[in-house]
Image (tube, helix red, strand yellow):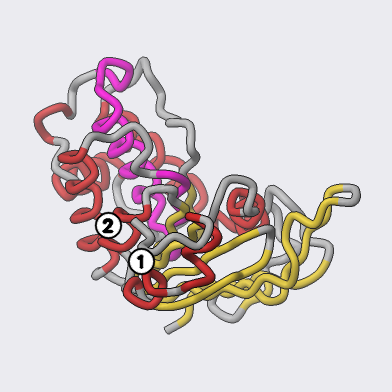
Amino acid sequence: MTVLAVDHVSVTFGGVHALTDVELTVDADSVTGLIGPNGAGKTTLFNVISGLQAPDRGRVTLDDRDITELKPYQRARLGIGRTFQRIEVFGSLTVRDNVRVSAEILKSWSRDAPDPASVADEIIDRIDLRAVADVRADELPTGLARLVELGRTLAVRPKVLLLDEPSAGLDDAETDRLAALLKEVSRHGLAILVVEHDVPFVVEVCSRIHVLDFGRILAVGTPREIQRSAAVQAAYLGGKAGVR
């Protein structure tokens, strides 16, 4: 079932067409990829979805509700969660307290929200951070800090999770761990949209991939279809065979 839909969205900055007539859907219980060369418009599209950038044309819907005119905090309350390329954690707080802060924010406006301490413990166990639960976030290596950021986002119970370059700075083992975690999390009904430059990671974790190039959707398909696409190979490798 489609949870998030981008419908014919266009954005211009002066004379630059950052996005042109972009369409994209993200389904529940799945991880969807968004890839493309530098400057393709991936971050601009994320900003449109999360409310940081207004489109010139088009709309964004969440559960068939038009959210195009809503502010970022209103979208967050409806279920859009996001991480950024740069890791955003509270360095002076422990891992547990980082997650708990997000759960307390949810509790502040949602009457149905569970106890923040219980939520923090549940998520710490779910993403396997129990061993570092009482460690300050600024003492963690990059891989664990990214998991903390993911845990904070999960604590607000999103319907859609937007991940911006989640594997950046991770080694192979950490990347494999993150891929397994995203697959597991998505099986519980979450719709995940991942922006990545790491194509092998996207191929591993995503069931469907959208390719953005010069602000336009170049291709949409399964990982196998995208890997075999001549247009995608040309965009990434100048026509050389094999997107890797």
In percent of width and height, residue 172 lies at: 20, 40
In percent of width and height, residue 95 lies at: 26, 28
Disc 1 to disc 2: CB gap under 8 Å: yes
Residue 58 against residue 133 in the figure, above or below? below
Task: Say which quarter of the image contains residue 99.
Answer: top left
Q: CA distance from mark 1 to mark 2?
A: 7 Å
Residue 39 against residue 146 in the figure, above or below? below
- Give amino acid for label 2: Leu
State which region is magenta: 136-165
Q: Secondary structure at mark 2?
A: helix
Can residue 149 be found in the magenta stretch?
Answer: yes
Which residue corresponds to mark 1? 31
Q: Residue at x 47, y 64 (%)?
A: 233
Name the residue at the right extreme. 14
Q: Secondary structure at mark 1?
A: strand
* Residues packed near mark 1 inside 10 Å, few (<14), some (14 to 19) or many (20 plus): many
Q: Residue at x 26, y 33 (%)?
A: 143
Q: Residue at x 53, y 77 (%)?
A: 63
Can residue 97 be found in the magenta stretch?
Answer: no
Q: Quadrant of the C terminus?
A: bottom left
Which residue corresponds to mark 2? 182
Upstream in sequence: badge 1 or badge 2: 1
Residue 116 against residue 41 in the figure, above or below? above
